[in-house]
Amino acid sequence: MIGSVSAYGAYNSIYYTSGATLAARSNALHADANEGAAVAVVAAVPEVFSNDRTVRVGRSPEEMKMAVDNAAKTMESPATERMRKRLGLEKCETCENRMYVDGSDEADVSFKTPGHIDPSASASVVMSHEREHVANAVQKGSRPDAKLISASVTLHTSICPECGRPYVSGGTTRTKIRHTADGSPIDGPKE
């Protein structure tokens, strides 16, 4: 490190300070020169890159108390509360009360009655449910008078408005099955 300048945001062992802080440091350098303080300014960052949260060495106790109070206020902000909920440190009521239900006419699939799915497991649980629909389509398409043409699954995602956590909000299975009108068998593909 060069000298005893603490300017903030060390990058490749070079310390930076804002333009206003640079001027204050220069004045302090001249004032402390008689006391033998070794201060070397390496570079200046334009004032555009400086902000109130920049930590500066040599603050008075009053300035430090204000900085601590500002940090405490930041920790109480709605954005911080949202992040705590997103990380699972606090309970998100919206995610806790979210229910999933199947809207199809197939009686042998899951979620015919409303059920809760944890947001972190929603992708795998919803995909598993949609695979049940695909399995039913394969079973219907394997009869002699039917042929499964295609089956596709689409998962739908959303973001919780309370905690901001992304989750799978549902899914859609699309199938195409060709049937013969008279019930006669469908020939397989010709080779």
Image (spheres, rainbow, N blue to C red):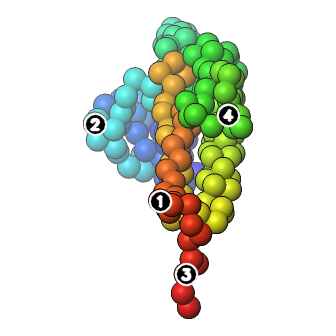
Residue occupied by mark 2: 48
Q: Earlier in the sequence, mark 1 or mark 3?
A: 1
Q: Nearer the viewer, mark 2 or mark 3?
A: 3
Instruction: Residue at 64%, 66% (x, y): give it.
Output: 144
Numbered badge on residue 107: 4
Left or right placement of residue 176 versus residue 43 in this view: right
Amino acid at circle 3: Pro
Query: Is disc 3 placed on a helix, strand or loop?
Result: loop
Position of residue 105 relative to residue 2, above or below, is above
Q: Nearer the viewer, mark 1 or mark 3?
A: 1
Instruction: Residue at 50%, 13% (x, y): give it.
Output: 77
Query: Is disc 4 placed on a helix, strand or loop?
Result: loop
Q: Nearer the viewer, residue 61 or 150?
A: 150
Whether residue 87 can be seen here = no
Q: Nearer the viewer, mark 2 or mark 4?
A: 4
Residue occupied by mark 1: 181
Q: Nearer the viewer, residue 38 or 45?
A: 45
Residue occupied by mark 3: 189
